[in-house]
Amino acid sequence: MTNLFGINTSDHIETPKLDVEVFRTKRISEEQDAEIESVLENEEKLEKQSSLPFPLSLIKILCQIGWMILFIGIIKALGSGTSLSQGFHNAPEIYLALPICFAFWLILQMISMRQRKKTIESSAFQKHNENANQLLQKIKDILGIPADAQSIDILAERYTIKDGNVKHKDMGMTGYDNLSIFIYTENNYLYLADVSTVWEIPLSSLRSIQLINKRASFPDWTKQEPYDSKTYKPYKITTNQFGHYFARYYRIEISDIKGEFYLLIPEYDGEIFMKLTRMYPDTE
């Protein structure tokens, strides 16, 4: 059994692709692919304009890690009975380095936020958004994705198969990659779609759903509301110093003539899936 949105990267696989492709029913044309690629290239260009140059971004990360480590060290020392004056006397370099690291990080953070705000408010960004939204609607019409189709995050992963055993492989610095996917049901089928493809899975092939009580890591936050907003706070989503996210997830098992798979959906999007499919965990 493999992840429905898994990629087999075993040595014998010449062209790795998502396992979900066995359920593909619709695909856009090469010309439409080129339109999407053009929009993505422009988005990447705008993203670079809104970000600090790589050397400054690296310094910002190092300063953030530095002041956090130093701060924790001082708190631990105070907790063990060492006074501020005694701690400064014993290790003045730590007490001096902390405000310096924090000041550098704060300055770079403010510059970064100002650059991003300037980009977002620019006419180029507004035009890009308009073009992207028009293209998205065009693609949805071509693929037949309902106007009211909701989107959920789905966790994709890499894996290898050796001696018949499936072995998970991390997606770079995180365990998984989270993909924003449209989801809807029609005529006893579950449909999943992105901006290029529609996949059709019989609802009768969905076997079980279980909330996994451990956290998966993924790189992006795809929702309009912040991860720590009132809407998502109940799911206790956390982040680390690299901006990666951690959340529990549902595992949905699929048994079909086309194969045995599981689908991974972060807990915060589980309710959408369950309401559409009317599947619920036996126990939580």
Image: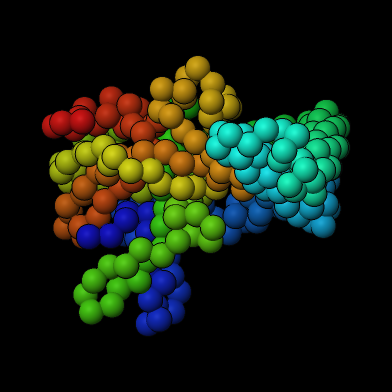
Q: Position of residue 4 (x, y in %)?
A: 32, 54
In the image, 186: left or right of 126? left
* Nearer the observer, 114 or 192: 114
Is 207 on the left-hand or right-hand side of 223? left
Q: Quadrant of the C terminus?
A: top left
Estimate the x, y position of residue 171 in percent, counting from the top left: 49, 59
Q: Position of residue 191 (x, y in %)?
A: 34, 40
Say if residue 248 shows up in the picture: yes
Find residue 114 and report its image quarter: top right
When the figure is inspected, residue 154 is found, relative to residue 160, above or below; the finding is above
Identify the residue at horizontal 75%, vertical 34% (top origin).
Answer: 85
The number of numbered badges drawn on the structure is 0
Q: Is residue 142 visible?
A: no
Name the outermost residue toward the bottom. Answer: 12
Closer to us: 14 or 252:
252
Residue at 79%, 52% in the rendered image = 59
Q: Residue at x 17, y 52 (%)?
A: 255
Residue ID at (16%, 58%)? 257
Nearest the eye: 25 or 168: 168
Whether residue 265 sits left or right of residue 51 in the image: it is left
Quadrant containing the N terminus in the rendered view: bottom left
